[in-house]
Image: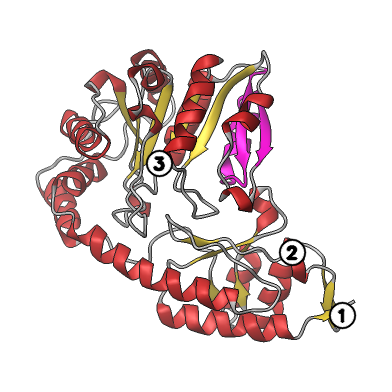
Amino acid sequence: MDAKAKAMKASGVDVVNFGVGEPDFDTPDNIKEAAIKAIKDGFTKYTPVGGIDPLKDAVIEKFRKDNNLEYARDEIIVSCGAKHSLYNIAQALYGPGDEVIIPSPYWVSYPDQVILNDAVPVFVKTYEKDKFMLKPGVLESHITKKTKAIILNSPSNPTGLTYDKKTIEGIAGVALKHNLYVISDEIYEKLTYDGFTHISIASLSNEIKARTLVVNGLSKAYAMTGWRIGYTAGPKDIVRAMTNIQSQSTSNPASIAQKAAVEALTGPQDFIKAMLSEFDRRRKFLVSELNSIPGISCLTPTGAFYAFPNTSKLYGKHADENKVSSSSELALYLLEKASVALVPGDAFGDNDYIRLSYATSMDNIRKGVERIKEAVNRLKQA
Protein backbone atom coordinates (compact mmCIF):
# COMPACT_ATOMS: atom_id res chain seq x y z
CA MET A 1 0.00 0.00 0.00
CA ASP A 2 2.78 2.42 0.94
CA ALA A 3 4.72 1.60 -2.26
CA LYS A 4 1.61 2.17 -4.37
CA ALA A 5 0.94 5.52 -2.67
CA LYS A 6 4.54 6.62 -3.29
CA ALA A 7 4.34 5.52 -6.92
CA MET A 8 1.11 7.49 -7.41
CA LYS A 9 2.67 10.57 -5.85
CA ALA A 10 5.80 10.20 -7.99
CA SER A 11 3.60 10.10 -11.10
CA GLY A 12 2.03 13.42 -10.16
CA VAL A 13 -1.12 12.31 -8.29
CA ASP A 14 -2.07 14.54 -5.36
CA VAL A 15 -2.12 11.90 -2.60
CA VAL A 16 -3.16 12.91 0.90
CA ASN A 17 -1.04 10.77 3.19
CA PHE A 18 -2.49 9.79 6.56
CA GLY A 19 -0.02 6.92 6.89
CA VAL A 20 3.00 8.77 8.23
CA GLY A 21 4.17 7.83 11.73
CA GLU A 22 6.38 10.83 12.38
CA PRO A 23 5.79 14.47 13.37
CA ASP A 24 5.55 16.90 10.46
CA PHE A 25 7.46 19.50 12.49
CA ASP A 26 11.14 20.34 12.09
CA THR A 27 13.67 19.48 14.77
CA PRO A 28 14.04 22.53 17.06
CA ASP A 29 16.89 24.87 16.23
CA ASN A 30 18.68 24.51 19.57
CA ILE A 31 18.96 20.77 18.96
CA LYS A 32 20.29 21.27 15.44
CA GLU A 33 22.78 23.83 16.73
CA ALA A 34 24.08 21.32 19.27
CA ALA A 35 24.71 18.86 16.44
CA ILE A 36 26.48 21.51 14.37
CA LYS A 37 28.65 22.40 17.36
CA ALA A 38 29.54 18.72 17.82
CA ILE A 39 30.71 18.58 14.20
CA LYS A 40 32.71 21.79 14.51
CA ASP A 41 34.25 20.54 17.75
CA GLY A 42 35.34 17.35 16.03
CA PHE A 43 33.04 15.12 18.08
CA THR A 44 32.84 12.69 15.18
CA LYS A 45 34.60 9.58 16.46
CA TYR A 46 33.48 6.37 18.13
CA THR A 47 31.85 6.72 21.53
CA PRO A 48 31.20 4.10 24.21
CA VAL A 49 28.91 1.45 22.74
CA GLY A 50 25.99 2.12 25.10
CA GLY A 51 26.12 5.90 24.81
CA ILE A 52 28.09 8.82 26.20
CA ASP A 53 27.85 9.58 29.92
CA PRO A 54 26.31 13.07 29.46
CA LEU A 55 23.46 11.49 27.51
CA LYS A 56 22.99 8.68 30.01
CA ASP A 57 22.92 11.30 32.76
CA ALA A 58 20.32 13.30 30.85
CA VAL A 59 18.20 10.16 30.46
CA ILE A 60 18.57 9.40 34.17
CA GLU A 61 17.44 12.92 35.05
CA LYS A 62 14.51 12.63 32.64
CA PHE A 63 13.34 9.45 34.40
CA ARG A 64 13.77 11.09 37.80
CA LYS A 65 11.85 14.23 36.83
CA ASP A 66 9.14 12.77 34.58
CA ASN A 67 8.57 9.30 36.02
CA ASN A 68 9.85 9.36 39.61
CA LEU A 69 12.29 6.60 38.70
CA GLU A 70 15.91 6.25 39.78
CA TYR A 71 18.48 4.55 37.54
CA ALA A 72 22.27 4.28 37.44
CA ARG A 73 24.38 4.56 34.30
CA ASP A 74 24.82 0.78 34.08
CA GLU A 75 21.03 0.44 33.88
CA ILE A 76 20.82 2.63 30.75
CA ILE A 77 21.70 1.87 27.14
CA VAL A 78 21.38 4.31 24.24
CA SER A 79 20.64 2.74 20.86
CA CYS A 80 19.89 3.73 17.28
CA GLY A 81 16.21 4.50 17.87
CA ALA A 82 13.51 2.89 20.02
CA LYS A 83 13.01 0.16 17.42
CA HIS A 84 16.66 -0.80 17.81
CA SER A 85 16.20 -0.75 21.60
CA LEU A 86 13.27 -3.16 21.31
CA TYR A 87 15.22 -5.49 19.04
CA ASN A 88 18.20 -5.48 21.40
CA ILE A 89 15.80 -6.53 24.15
CA ALA A 90 14.42 -9.32 21.98
CA GLN A 91 17.90 -10.64 21.31
CA ALA A 92 19.01 -10.37 24.92
CA LEU A 93 15.87 -11.70 26.60
CA TYR A 94 14.00 -14.20 24.42
CA GLY A 95 15.01 -17.81 23.99
CA PRO A 96 13.75 -20.49 21.56
CA GLY A 97 10.13 -21.32 22.32
CA ASP A 98 9.62 -18.49 24.81
CA GLU A 99 6.16 -16.97 24.59
CA VAL A 100 5.76 -13.20 24.48
CA ILE A 101 2.30 -11.77 25.06
CA ILE A 102 1.39 -8.98 22.63
CA PRO A 103 -1.94 -7.17 23.08
CA SER A 104 -3.64 -6.50 19.77
CA PRO A 105 -3.96 -4.13 18.03
CA TYR A 106 -0.16 -3.84 18.12
CA TRP A 107 2.65 -1.93 16.47
CA VAL A 108 3.72 -3.84 13.38
CA SER A 109 7.30 -4.64 14.47
CA TYR A 110 6.49 -6.40 17.75
CA PRO A 111 5.57 -9.82 16.33
CA ASP A 112 8.41 -10.01 13.82
CA GLN A 113 11.00 -9.05 16.43
CA VAL A 114 9.76 -11.92 18.58
CA ILE A 115 9.71 -14.41 15.68
CA LEU A 116 13.17 -13.41 14.43
CA ASN A 117 14.55 -14.44 17.81
CA ASP A 118 12.93 -17.90 17.75
CA ALA A 119 10.28 -16.94 20.30
CA VAL A 120 6.50 -17.16 19.90
CA PRO A 121 4.16 -14.16 19.82
CA VAL A 122 0.92 -14.77 21.72
CA PHE A 123 -1.71 -12.28 20.60
CA VAL A 124 -4.36 -11.22 23.09
CA LYS A 125 -7.21 -9.24 21.60
CA THR A 126 -8.26 -6.01 23.29
CA TYR A 127 -11.56 -4.27 22.67
CA GLU A 128 -12.86 -0.83 21.87
CA LYS A 129 -15.33 -1.03 24.78
CA ASP A 130 -12.30 -1.32 27.11
CA LYS A 131 -10.49 1.51 25.29
CA PHE A 132 -8.12 -1.16 23.96
CA MET A 133 -6.63 -1.78 27.40
CA LEU A 134 -5.56 -5.33 28.18
CA LYS A 135 -7.49 -6.49 31.22
CA PRO A 136 -5.31 -8.15 33.89
CA GLY A 137 -7.60 -11.18 34.15
CA VAL A 138 -7.48 -11.71 30.40
CA LEU A 139 -3.69 -11.39 30.48
CA GLU A 140 -3.46 -14.02 33.21
CA SER A 141 -5.63 -16.46 31.26
CA HIS A 142 -3.06 -16.49 28.43
CA ILE A 143 -0.01 -17.19 30.60
CA THR A 144 1.64 -20.60 30.30
CA LYS A 145 4.84 -22.15 31.61
CA LYS A 146 6.55 -20.81 28.50
CA THR A 147 5.50 -17.18 28.93
CA LYS A 148 8.56 -14.94 29.27
CA ALA A 149 7.31 -11.39 28.82
CA ILE A 150 4.52 -9.02 27.92
CA ILE A 151 4.86 -6.01 25.65
CA LEU A 152 2.98 -2.95 26.87
CA ASN A 153 2.58 0.16 24.70
CA SER A 154 1.01 3.30 26.15
CA PRO A 155 0.23 5.68 24.58
CA SER A 156 -0.51 3.21 21.82
CA ASN A 157 0.40 3.00 18.20
CA PRO A 158 -2.00 2.33 16.45
CA THR A 159 -4.99 3.12 18.68
CA GLY A 160 -3.88 6.42 20.19
CA LEU A 161 -5.34 5.24 23.50
CA THR A 162 -3.65 5.18 26.91
CA TYR A 163 -3.64 2.85 29.92
CA ASP A 164 -5.10 4.08 33.21
CA LYS A 165 -3.31 3.55 36.52
CA LYS A 166 -5.68 0.87 37.80
CA THR A 167 -5.14 -1.33 34.75
CA ILE A 168 -1.37 -0.83 34.82
CA GLU A 169 -1.34 -1.81 38.49
CA GLY A 170 -3.30 -4.96 37.66
CA ILE A 171 -0.91 -5.89 34.87
CA ALA A 172 2.05 -5.32 37.18
CA GLY A 173 0.50 -7.63 39.75
CA VAL A 174 0.03 -10.40 37.19
CA ALA A 175 3.57 -9.96 35.87
CA LEU A 176 5.04 -10.24 39.35
CA LYS A 177 2.87 -13.21 40.27
CA HIS A 178 4.11 -15.15 37.24
CA ASN A 179 7.68 -13.77 37.22
CA LEU A 180 7.27 -12.14 33.79
CA TYR A 181 9.28 -9.35 32.26
CA VAL A 182 7.44 -6.26 31.05
CA ILE A 183 8.71 -4.47 27.96
CA SER A 184 7.14 -1.03 28.25
CA ASP A 185 7.25 0.99 25.04
CA GLU A 186 6.72 4.60 26.14
CA ILE A 187 7.89 6.46 23.03
CA TYR A 188 4.71 8.61 22.91
CA GLU A 189 4.62 9.46 26.64
CA LYS A 190 4.91 13.23 26.14
CA LEU A 191 2.12 13.32 23.56
CA THR A 192 -1.04 13.04 25.67
CA TYR A 193 -4.27 15.04 25.76
CA ASP A 194 -7.24 16.03 27.93
CA GLY A 195 -5.15 16.22 31.09
CA PHE A 196 -4.00 12.62 30.92
CA THR A 197 -0.75 11.96 32.81
CA HIS A 198 1.39 9.09 31.63
CA ILE A 199 2.37 6.55 34.29
CA SER A 200 5.32 4.25 33.69
CA ILE A 201 4.65 0.76 35.00
CA ALA A 202 8.20 0.66 36.34
CA SER A 203 7.36 3.49 38.75
CA LEU A 204 4.76 1.48 40.68
CA SER A 205 7.20 -0.42 42.91
CA ASN A 206 10.80 -1.55 43.17
CA GLU A 207 9.59 -5.10 42.49
CA ILE A 208 8.02 -4.35 39.12
CA LYS A 209 10.88 -1.99 38.22
CA ALA A 210 13.25 -4.96 38.57
CA ARG A 211 11.16 -6.86 35.97
CA THR A 212 10.61 -3.97 33.54
CA LEU A 213 12.54 -2.67 30.54
CA VAL A 214 11.38 0.85 29.72
CA VAL A 215 11.92 1.89 26.11
CA ASN A 216 11.77 5.50 24.99
CA GLY A 217 13.48 7.85 22.56
CA LEU A 218 13.70 11.26 20.95
CA SER A 219 11.88 10.65 17.66
CA LYS A 220 8.30 11.58 18.48
CA ALA A 221 8.45 14.24 21.18
CA TYR A 222 11.33 16.18 19.63
CA ALA A 223 10.63 15.56 15.93
CA MET A 224 13.92 13.66 15.59
CA THR A 225 12.88 10.53 13.69
CA GLY A 226 15.90 10.67 11.38
CA TRP A 227 18.42 11.20 14.16
CA ARG A 228 17.92 7.63 15.42
CA ILE A 229 18.30 7.90 19.18
CA GLY A 230 16.42 5.62 21.53
CA TYR A 231 17.17 4.32 24.99
CA THR A 232 16.30 1.55 27.43
CA ALA A 233 16.30 1.54 31.22
CA GLY A 234 16.22 -1.77 33.05
CA PRO A 235 18.02 -4.42 35.10
CA LYS A 236 21.75 -4.04 34.64
CA ASP A 237 22.35 -7.67 33.67
CA ILE A 238 19.96 -7.33 30.72
CA VAL A 239 21.32 -3.90 29.82
CA ARG A 240 24.83 -5.40 29.86
CA ALA A 241 23.70 -8.16 27.49
CA MET A 242 22.06 -5.58 25.21
CA THR A 243 25.29 -3.58 25.18
CA ASN A 244 27.30 -6.67 24.22
CA ILE A 245 24.87 -7.37 21.38
CA GLN A 246 25.01 -3.77 20.20
CA SER A 247 28.80 -3.82 20.25
CA GLN A 248 28.73 -6.55 17.60
CA SER A 249 26.03 -4.98 15.42
CA THR A 250 25.83 -1.19 15.18
CA SER A 251 28.43 -0.22 17.77
CA ASN A 252 27.57 3.18 19.25
CA PRO A 253 24.73 5.43 18.07
CA ALA A 254 25.96 8.37 15.97
CA SER A 255 28.16 10.63 18.09
CA ILE A 256 26.63 13.80 16.64
CA ALA A 257 23.07 12.62 17.26
CA GLN A 258 23.98 11.82 20.86
CA LYS A 259 25.10 15.40 21.46
CA ALA A 260 21.87 16.64 19.89
CA ALA A 261 19.93 14.30 22.19
CA VAL A 262 21.61 15.77 25.28
CA GLU A 263 20.39 19.20 24.23
CA ALA A 264 16.91 17.86 23.50
CA LEU A 265 16.55 16.38 26.97
CA THR A 266 18.22 19.18 28.93
CA GLY A 267 17.33 22.24 26.88
CA PRO A 268 14.06 24.19 26.57
CA GLN A 269 10.94 22.01 26.39
CA ASP A 270 8.56 24.67 25.01
CA PHE A 271 8.62 23.05 21.57
CA ILE A 272 6.75 20.00 22.85
CA LYS A 273 3.90 22.09 24.24
CA ALA A 274 3.54 24.00 20.98
CA MET A 275 3.58 20.82 18.89
CA LEU A 276 1.14 19.11 21.22
CA SER A 277 -1.26 22.05 21.03
CA GLU A 278 -1.32 21.77 17.25
CA PHE A 279 -1.75 18.00 17.37
CA ASP A 280 -4.65 18.51 19.77
CA ARG A 281 -6.37 20.89 17.34
CA ARG A 282 -6.00 18.39 14.51
CA ARG A 283 -7.08 15.48 16.72
CA LYS A 284 -10.37 17.10 17.67
CA PHE A 285 -11.16 18.09 14.09
CA LEU A 286 -10.28 14.72 12.56
CA VAL A 287 -12.21 12.64 15.09
CA SER A 288 -15.27 14.87 14.79
CA GLU A 289 -15.21 14.61 11.00
CA LEU A 290 -14.70 10.84 11.01
CA ASN A 291 -17.63 10.38 13.38
CA SER A 292 -19.84 12.36 11.00
CA ILE A 293 -19.35 9.77 8.23
CA PRO A 294 -22.08 7.09 8.17
CA GLY A 295 -20.56 3.66 8.84
CA ILE A 296 -17.49 5.02 10.64
CA SER A 297 -17.07 5.50 14.39
CA CYS A 298 -13.95 6.66 16.20
CA LEU A 299 -12.93 6.85 19.85
CA THR A 300 -11.18 10.08 20.79
CA PRO A 301 -7.47 9.27 21.17
CA THR A 302 -5.80 10.36 24.40
CA GLY A 303 -2.21 10.04 23.19
CA ALA A 304 0.20 9.83 20.24
CA PHE A 305 -1.02 11.27 16.91
CA TYR A 306 -3.25 8.53 15.50
CA ALA A 307 -6.97 8.06 15.05
CA PHE A 308 -8.17 4.46 14.86
CA PRO A 309 -11.74 4.44 13.54
CA ASN A 310 -13.95 1.36 13.31
CA THR A 311 -14.88 0.83 9.69
CA SER A 312 -16.38 -2.67 9.89
CA LYS A 313 -19.89 -1.41 9.01
CA LEU A 314 -18.57 -0.52 5.55
CA TYR A 315 -17.47 -4.08 4.82
CA GLY A 316 -19.65 -5.88 2.31
CA LYS A 317 -20.39 -2.68 0.38
CA HIS A 318 -19.17 -1.86 -3.12
CA ALA A 319 -18.79 0.97 -5.60
CA ASP A 320 -19.02 -0.33 -9.16
CA GLU A 321 -16.29 -2.96 -9.50
CA ASN A 322 -14.71 -2.10 -6.14
CA LYS A 323 -15.85 -4.40 -3.34
CA VAL A 324 -14.88 -3.58 0.23
CA SER A 325 -14.80 -6.60 2.53
CA SER A 326 -11.76 -5.85 4.72
CA SER A 327 -9.60 -3.02 6.02
CA SER A 328 -7.05 -3.71 3.27
CA GLU A 329 -9.68 -3.50 0.54
CA LEU A 330 -11.05 -0.30 2.06
CA ALA A 331 -7.56 1.21 2.21
CA LEU A 332 -6.93 0.23 -1.41
CA TYR A 333 -10.29 1.65 -2.49
CA LEU A 334 -9.58 4.96 -0.76
CA LEU A 335 -6.12 5.12 -2.30
CA GLU A 336 -7.20 4.30 -5.84
CA LYS A 337 -10.51 6.21 -5.91
CA ALA A 338 -9.91 9.06 -3.47
CA SER A 339 -6.10 9.42 -3.51
CA VAL A 340 -5.98 9.04 0.27
CA ALA A 341 -3.30 6.86 1.87
CA LEU A 342 -3.82 5.28 5.28
CA VAL A 343 -2.94 2.02 7.03
CA PRO A 344 -5.37 -0.91 7.17
CA GLY A 345 -6.07 -2.36 10.59
CA ASP A 346 -5.06 -5.87 9.62
CA ALA A 347 -1.46 -4.62 9.62
CA PHE A 348 -1.92 -4.14 13.37
CA GLY A 349 -3.83 -7.35 13.97
CA ASP A 350 -7.39 -5.98 13.87
CA ASN A 351 -9.28 -5.95 10.61
CA ASP A 352 -12.20 -3.86 11.91
CA TYR A 353 -10.19 -0.64 11.91
CA ILE A 354 -7.99 1.68 9.89
CA ARG A 355 -5.29 4.02 11.18
CA LEU A 356 -4.97 7.66 10.25
CA SER A 357 -2.08 9.84 11.41
CA TYR A 358 -2.81 13.50 12.05
CA ALA A 359 0.89 14.32 11.86
CA THR A 360 0.11 16.29 8.73
CA SER A 361 -1.16 19.79 8.06
CA MET A 362 -4.72 20.86 8.83
CA ASP A 363 -5.17 21.65 5.13
CA ASN A 364 -4.26 18.06 4.27
CA ILE A 365 -6.57 16.72 6.95
CA ARG A 366 -9.51 18.78 5.66
CA LYS A 367 -8.85 17.75 2.08
CA GLY A 368 -8.34 14.10 2.97
CA VAL A 369 -11.46 13.84 5.11
CA GLU A 370 -13.61 15.34 2.35
CA ARG A 371 -12.23 12.77 -0.08
CA ILE A 372 -12.95 9.96 2.37
CA LYS A 373 -16.53 11.21 2.85
CA GLU A 374 -17.17 11.32 -0.89
CA ALA A 375 -15.67 7.86 -1.46
CA VAL A 376 -17.57 6.28 1.44
CA ASN A 377 -20.83 7.86 0.28
CA ARG A 378 -20.36 6.13 -3.09
CA LEU A 379 -20.32 2.73 -1.43
CA LYS A 380 -23.56 0.78 -1.67
CA GLN A 381 -24.75 -2.38 0.07
CA ALA A 382 -23.99 -5.49 -2.00
Which residue, given by chain and number where applicable, does mark 2 sit on?
312
Q: How is the image coloured?
A: secondary structure
Q: What element does badge 2 sit on?
A: helix
Q: Position of residue 153 (x, y in %)?
A: 49, 41
Query: Of marks 2 and 1, which one's residue comes earlier in the chain?
Result: 2
**304 over 67 or under it: above or below:** below
330 left or right of 39? right
Q: What element does badge 1 sit on?
A: loop
Q: What element does badge 3 sit on?
A: loop
Q: Amino acid at mark 2?
A: Ser
Q: Residue at x 65, y 32 (%)?
A: 138
Q: CA distance from mark 2 to mark 1?
A: 19 Å
Which residue, given by chain and number where applicable, does mark 3 sit on?
186
Q: CA distance from mark 3 to mark 2?
A: 29 Å
**155 over 380 or under it: above or below:** above
On residue 184, the disc is none
Q: Residue furthest right?
A: 382
Q: Residues within 10 Å of mark 1 (few under 14, many from 20)?
A: few
Q: Position of residue 313 (x, y in %)?
A: 76, 68
Q: Position of residue 91 (x, y in %)?
A: 52, 23
